[in-house]
């Protein structure tokens, strides 16, 4: 994410410098937590050191405090927790973090239903033409090249996690 980028969500302008993807992970984790979250837990979630987490918490705390949204408090031997300062600002902030989280989440899903059209398929579905077009697209050199270059994992419906 670009340094100092401002995001407009609803009525709140996030002028905050959320500089790293891990900042979003930390904030979202703290927002969703019902109990204090330890630095060890945050370090594991972000693949970071404890020192980095403590530095990030100080940075994020200063930004949240400056905007009058919340304060990240440290509870000895328990972890970090968000104390809300302004409910309306916090609600907007929380919703914004959810949007940012989904924007920067590193997994995408693309669904299609390719298939070859034969006499049996023509009698079973009205989507025969669409299935043939999906098959042609997925087997094109351009798509195959993009899949390889971007390390895309292709799976079947049966392989989806339940």
Image: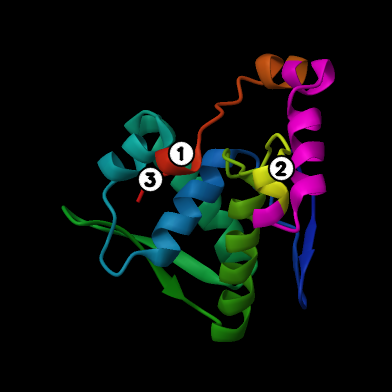
Secondary-structure class at tag 3: loop
Q: Which residue is mark 3?
A: 161
Q: Earlier in the sequence, mark 3 or mark 1?
A: 1
> Residue 122, percent across and down?
73, 50
Q: Which residue is mark 1?
A: 55
Question: In the rendered structure, which segment of residues is drawn in magenta?
Answer: 123-144
**Is residue 23 something one can see in this rendering?**
yes
Q: Earlier in the sequence, mark 2 or mark 1?
A: 1
Q: Is residue 1 above or below residue 47?
A: below
Nearer the observer, 98 or 3: 98
**Is residue 112 something one can see in this rendering?**
no
Q: Residue furthest left?
A: 77
Residue, x 49% and y 43% (percent of image)? Answer: 157
Q: Is residue 135 left or right of residue 43?
A: right
Q: Is residue 60 above or below residue 117?
A: below
Answer few, some or many: residues within 10 Å of disc 1's Cα (few below 14, many 20 plus, some between 14 and 19): few
Q: Is residue 25 magenta?
A: no
Q: CA distance from mark 2 to mark 1?
A: 65 Å
Question: On residue 125, which mark appears?
Answer: none
Q: Which is more foreground, mark 3 or mark 1?
A: 3
Question: On residue 119, which mark appears?
Answer: 2
Q: Is residue 92 left or right of residue 162?
A: right
Nearer the observer, 112 or 31: 112
Answer few, some or many: residues within 10 Å of disc 2's Cα (few below 14, many 20 plus, some between 14 and 19): few
């Amino acid at each position: 994410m670009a340094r100092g980028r401002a995001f407009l969500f609803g009525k709140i302008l996030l002028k905050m410098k959320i500089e790293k993807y891990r900042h979003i992970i930390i904030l979202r984790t703290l927002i969703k937590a019902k109990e204090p979250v330890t630095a060890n837990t945050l370090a594991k979630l972000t693949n970071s050191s404890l020192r980095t987490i403590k530095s990030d918490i100080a940075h994020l705390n200063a930004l949240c405090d400056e905007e009058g949204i919340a304060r990240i408090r440290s509870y000895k031997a328990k972890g970090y927790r968000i104390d809300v300062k302004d409910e309306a600002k916090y609600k907007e902030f929380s919703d914004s973090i959810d949007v940012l989280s989904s924007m920067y989440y590193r997994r995408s899903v693309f669904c299609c239903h390719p298939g070859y059209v034969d006499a049996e398929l023509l009698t079973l579905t009205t989507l025969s033409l669409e299935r043939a077009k999906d098959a042609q697209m997925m087997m094109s050199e351009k798509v195959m090249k993009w899949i390889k270059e971007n390390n895309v994992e292709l799976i079947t419906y049966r392989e989806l996690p339940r």
